[in-house]
Image (cartoon, rainbow, N blue to C red):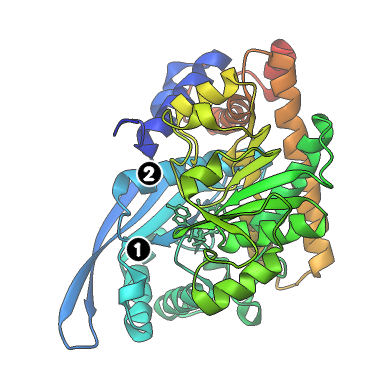
Amino acid sequence: MTGKELNSFENAKVQIKMAVEKMGLDHVVYELLKEPMREMVVSIPIKMDNGTTKVFKGYRVQHNNALGPAKGGIRFHPDSDLDEVRALAMWMTFKCAVVGIPYGGAKGAVACNPEELSETELERLSRGYVQAINPIVGPEKDIPAPDVNTNAQIMSWMMDEFSRIKQYNAFGVITGKPLIIGGSLGREEATAQGCVYVIEEITKKLNVNLEGAKVVIQGFGNVGGNLAKILFDKKAVIIGISDVKGGIYNPKGINPYKVSEHLAVTGSVVNYSKAKTITNQELLELNCDILIPAAVENQITAENANRIKAKIVVEAANGPTTPEADKILEQKGILVVPDILANAGGVTVSYFEWVQNNMGFYWTKEEVNKRLGQIMGQAFQQVYNLYQARKDVNMRMAAYMLAIDRVAQAMKVRGWIGSKIETEQKVTHKLA
Ligand code: NAD
């Protein structure tokens, strides 16, 4: 496992280059997509509760907006840096394109440890970040959302700050808001729900019965926790769960609702009485039907890929598998459902939230989930068909090819690139 292997930005560039070459697209498409179109790095001075001033570094990266306004979450994390934000912004471009929603890709971050901040410091930091990036965001420009360590409360402060600056109620500037100020029903569990739609499709294709299937989930936050509960309700057997402090394992199955109660009391899934405590490494290597990384980047690497025993890996997290590991998994016959497809449910319902804000007309949860199912089902089918038709690409590459083709078509008709770009139908036809 090398430092280079773990640089998500470099990894994302490798994936784009391969897709552009496989499709025979003009090199200029790669030149345009390998770097973000716009990057903003800001210094945010915040008055701390003890009277001192601390300066935080913030980022907002807009990778590409050919298909629509840029869209992507804001992360509060001590390790966040520009390269990480660039990679995440790129993935957003392709994630939106692969599910066919009219957005480009962006991402933001503030390098900070929210656990060390009081509530009032966190509010000042959230407002300070928006003051700094407000010239480049807006309902028609770039629409942020929550990501790691940010939540609906932080989105409320950010929306409020932007609205104060612009002197109107700009609900559509940010998604992932509380329901009372224009949030969408179904947003909280949207990423997990979208991932479950994809899991239902892939298990059907591979003749794996989801009922009784052995599932291992790394990460028990918004995505992993909701996933565990929805899959448990569908009678899958959740044999392993983990969080940053470690994992738990029971071959007979674990009840995630009970684990949630244990987590609420103890702060972690570990030491849950009805399972054995294991490490995150051991968890990833468990014998199971479906392994779902739902925590952070670079968890399946060249170092451990050979020991992965799952039949299917479904990437609920962003970038959990390195390109080297991807090759090893492919050689082992393990099917990987890529992140840009598997976790696109979150941005899809974010899109629904923005649409509802723009209309001022709100949908029921049933309507939200029905539309989410349609979008995820269609995107899965398109990626799977291309993967089957091409034979020489894995599902990740098929997803990238579909997404890049759509972005390239938009750039072509907008006149950003002059070379000949074939239409999607032609590409799919030729590949078939
Ligand atoms: P979260 O902060 O709610 O939960 C993260 C979970 O992962 C926690 O249980 C945490 O303890 C665990 N974790 C953190 N570091 C870990 C490590 N090194 N090893 C094992 N476990 C670790 O975050 P989330 O919103 O659930 O996001 C999880 C992943 O899904 C991230 O990659 C995120 O970018 C991606 N994602 C989230 C959404 C969304 O809507 N929340 C949408 C798309 C993608």
Name which residue lies at 75% across and 54% down.
231
Q: Name the residue tied to disc 1.
A: 133
Name which residue lies at 81% across and 47% down.
374
Q: Give the percent coordinates (x, y) of residue 184.
A: 68, 69
Mark 2 or 1, nearer chain start: 2
Dot 2 beta carbon under 8 Å from ligand 1: no
Name which residue lies at 60% across and 47% down.
316
Query: Which amino acid lies under the numbered mark 1 shown in the image of this protein?
Result: Ile
State how far apart marks 2 and 1 are (Cα): 16 Å
Q: Quadrant of residue 322?
A: top left
Residue 288 in the figure: left or right of residue 331 = right
Q: Name the residue tied to disc 2.
A: 86
Establish if 104 lies above or below 230.
above
- Between 137 and 74, the one lying in front of the other is 74
Q: Quadrant of residue 235?
A: bottom right
Mark 1 residue element: helix
